[in-house]
Image: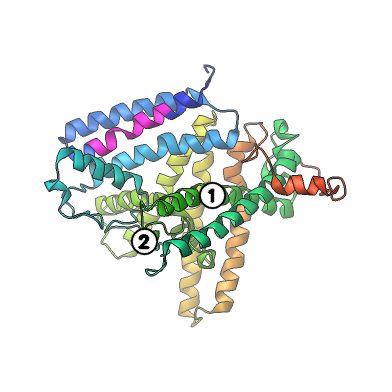
């Protein structure tokens, strides 16, 4: 395999080229043959960039592979072949006329805003289950509240990064490629939730900074910047965790692909056949998008996909258990939600290492999100650096 280029500018430039055609296609709606040709060129560019670029940090290389190449490809399929926003009634809340009646420059800008709105916030077709900002909340109140949330996300991010950068299997002994389960079940759970906590807090930090800047400058109303993720109070089944808490930024094209597949196999809307066709399509699409990240790290096909297929299989089983409980007369209550939340917690602790192995197999330490750790610096300043040492267990394969 040819040596990869350590080039963040080239990496990012290729991603920009991936995205540029999408608003133009939406705004002009060329013939199908031309849309197929444009998509084929994007696919070729993604294939080239996916096997050409790398970065020093394993986690960022994986994440940007998914974001720079996987996300644009499925977004392109959504807008090129599965929907036509110019004719299907798609509108922004500030639109004064249908997009098809706008001038070409206006349509291109309109389409650019549509693509940039991953979740459809501010549009008449938002993805389902988004949390809402109260209609009466002022800019000042929003900024104060979300500044406090931003501080909280920074603290969470700092804590999980301290854990990751001090755990031998993700730092000093990363070259030995120990999987997340190699330190026993307790540390497997800690490793799993440190991984998800790093993603969750990192995305939220970036999102809150953008939201606060946009609201403070008067560019957007607070209501156009609802929380990025759903509430963890909804995470009492694996289905709800993915559908209401986590998958929000992918749901636009996940839903359209799922509905297309269900329709293609003749499943009647509202039936179990349609529901499960959409469920499995959703996780296959998500798996394929994450497989792009695998390939960015030179991993063989199937590692990320295995994790996402496991989620669909468990949800199928979970639905059966819930259905059985209903037939036995068991009603949803605080007790059932608590049991479901515990089961969901254990499930992700058990299966997350399958996905995390993509990165541990790369054999490089996970770099911290920020160059300085405020908590680590304070701990050191108080002379406590050597006073509290986590008894890391000896890892084993």
Question: Magenta segment range?
Answer: 13-24
Measured from the top left, where is residue 82 in percent x and y?
25, 46
Whether residue 79 appears in magenta in the rendering, the answer is: no
**Residue 235 to residue 100: above or below:** below
Give left or right: position of 264 versus 388.
left
Q: Secondary structure at mark 1?
A: helix
Give left or right: position of 108 versus 303.
left
Measured from the top left, where is residue 56 in percent x and y?
60, 28
Of helix, strand and loop, which mostly describes the magenta segment? helix
Which residue shows up at 32% across the image and 48% down it? 257
Measured from the top left, where is residue 271 in percent x and y?
31, 65
* Residue at mark 1: 205
Q: Secondary structure at mark 2?
A: loop
Which residue shows up at 87% across the image and 45% down it? 386
**Residue 252 to residue 304: above or below:** below
Q: Residue 187 — which label?
A: none
Task: First in sequence, mark 1 or 2: give its number.
Answer: 2
């Amino acid at each position: 395999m040819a040596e990869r280029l350590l080039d963040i500018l080239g990496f990012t430039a290729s991603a920009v080229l991936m995205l540029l055609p999408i608003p133009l296609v939406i705004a002009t709606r060329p013939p199908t043959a031309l849309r197929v040709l444009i998509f084929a060129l994007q696919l070729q560019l993604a294939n080239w960039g996916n096997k050409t670029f790398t970065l020093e940090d394993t986690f960022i290389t994986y994440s940007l592979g998914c974001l720079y190449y996987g996300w644009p490809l499925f977004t392109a399929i959504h807008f090129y072949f599965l929907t036509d926003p110019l004719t299907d009634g798609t509108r922004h809340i500030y639109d004064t006329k249908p997009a098809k009646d706008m001038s070409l420059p206006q349509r291109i800008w309109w389409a650019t805003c549509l693509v940039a709105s991953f979740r459809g916030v501010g549009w008449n077709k938002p993805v389902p289950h988004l949390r809402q900002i109260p209609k009466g909340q002022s800019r000042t109140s929003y900024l104060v509240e979300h500044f406090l949330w931003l501080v909280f996300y920074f603290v969470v991010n700092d804590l999980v990064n301290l854990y990751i950068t001090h755990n031998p299997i993700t730092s000093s002994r990363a070259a030995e490629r120990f999987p997340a389960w190699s330190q026993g079940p307790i540390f497997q759970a800690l490793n799993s939730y440190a991984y998800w906590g790093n993603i969750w807090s990192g995305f939220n930090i970036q999102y809150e900074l953008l939201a606060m800047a946009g609201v403070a400058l008067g560019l957007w109303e607070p209501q156009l910047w609802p929380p990025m993720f759903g509430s963890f109070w909804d995470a009492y089944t694996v289905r709800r965790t993915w559908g209401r808490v986590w998958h929000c930024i992918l749901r636009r094209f996940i839903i359209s692909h799922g509905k297309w597949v269900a329709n293609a196999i003749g499943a009647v809307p509202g039936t179990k056949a349609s529901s499960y066709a959409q469920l499995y399509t959703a996780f296959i699409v998500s798996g394929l998008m994450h497989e792009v990240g695998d390939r960015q790290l030179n991993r063989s096909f199937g590692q990320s996909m295995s994790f996402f297929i496991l989620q669909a299989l468990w949800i199928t089983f979970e639905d059966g258990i819930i259905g059985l409980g209903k037939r036995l007369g068991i009603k949803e209550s605080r007790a059932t939600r608590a049991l479901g939340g515990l089961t969901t917690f254990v499930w992700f602790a058990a299966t997350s290492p399958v996905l995390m192995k993509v990165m541990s197999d790369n054999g490089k330490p996970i770099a911290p999100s920020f160059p300085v750790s405020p908590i680590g610096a304070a701990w050191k300043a108080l002379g406590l650096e050597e006073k509290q040492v986590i008894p890391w267990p000896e890892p084993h394969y």
